[in-house]
Amino acid sequence: MNSAQEDHYGMYLKVDLYLVTNATGLAFNPAIATTRTSLNSLINLIAQADSTATRDITGFTLAKNQHREQLITEFKRIRSAMIGYLIANPDIKKKMIVDFENSEIDKFTDPELYMKTDQVLDLALPVKALLVPYGVTGAQVDALNALNELWPSMEPLGRLEEGVNKAARKDVSAYMEQTNALLKNVLDGYLKIVESNNPNLYDQYLTARMIDDSGGNSGTEGYEIQTTTIPPGGSVTFPVGPGPIDPNLQLYFRVVTIGGGVVICTTGMPASPCMGGYALASGTTFKDTASALGIDLMLPTIQVTNPGLAPVVVRGGIKINQ
């Protein structure tokens, strides 16, 4: 979701929580409960689409990045062996083809890496049996060749996953349009009667319907996000992988309810509520590295505690397309 969509999504969650909390006071009209069911279904559809929009492309990106790292490692090994071979068996033109600095190789774009690896393999494959004195076996040359041959098959997969990503983003927008219409054309009308019968209850609804855009940089693009309702005094853990936690890990946390904040800390297992840590206020966003939380990163698990007397909805997760 982008920032504007995230702010709207926060409003949907607040309205849903309002309907649940005040179910008894709104029971005079059974259609309100039915509308809440529809609203909740749309909220879940938005969350699922947003999850697809971030995770699917990331799964490909992670696999591709791992492949690239492995290929670069083997490329450097074979290139070094070829330089040694071409010094012992001088060929200036061929040596120029493989004469790169490691820092240059790391900066190759994917197409450049594929092309340069192909060029080095053109030289190495015919003489692979002669490279042993230079630290490389024929099997390693063949392994690099196999890695490079995978590039063309990975690229179409990436385009396919990117298509899935774009389709999911369209789904997010479509479901949000349906949700806005449900609130404006149905629920707002049902709640109008409450305005005169129970002004306080109606004011609470208006507060829930407010779109909080004070969070600024609240968009979730590029993050794998989960939405959690934390009960009063309760705590939840957010998976970030095995500890200790990387201080450069990019994190996202946003309190989307009004009138309550949370405390973020790290914990061992079994977990215990945060007694201190990073305080995140209602309607605000943390979007930074783990080190910016100022908490103990040697413990393996990030935990969020609700110290208040009312439920708090938190969106949180990690950046996954780095």
Image (cartoon, grey):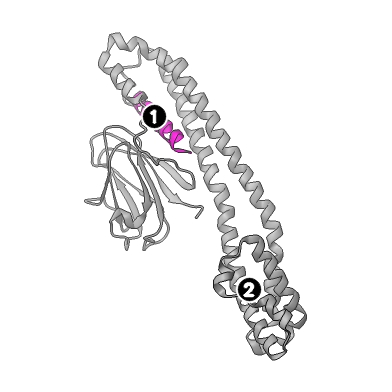
Magenta-colored span: 1-20
Task: Please report the residue visible at 48 percent of the width from the left and 34 percent of the height from the top.
Answer: 44
Left or right, 108 with reference to 291: right
The residue pinned by badge 2 equals: 75
Amino acid beneath label 2 = Phe
* 1 vs 2, front mark: 2
Q: For numbered disc 2, what is the local secondary structure?
A: helix
55 inside magenta stretch: no
Examine the rendered structure and indicate whether residue 134 appears above or below residue 237: below
Judged by its main secondary structure, the magenta piece is: helix
Can you give x and y, in whole percent of width and height, for residue 202 in the image? 30, 16
Question: What residue is shown at x 72% (from left), y 71% (from top)?
Answer: 119
Is residue 295 visible to the viewer in this orientation of the structure?
yes
| Quarter of the image where one finds residue 171 | top right
Tell whether 166 sits left or right of 322. Answer: right
Q: Quadrant of residue 213?
A: top left
Q: Nearer the viewer, residue 218 or 245?
A: 218
Residue positioned 33% across, 58% down in the render: 291
Where residue 207 appears, as percent x and y from the top left, is 31, 24
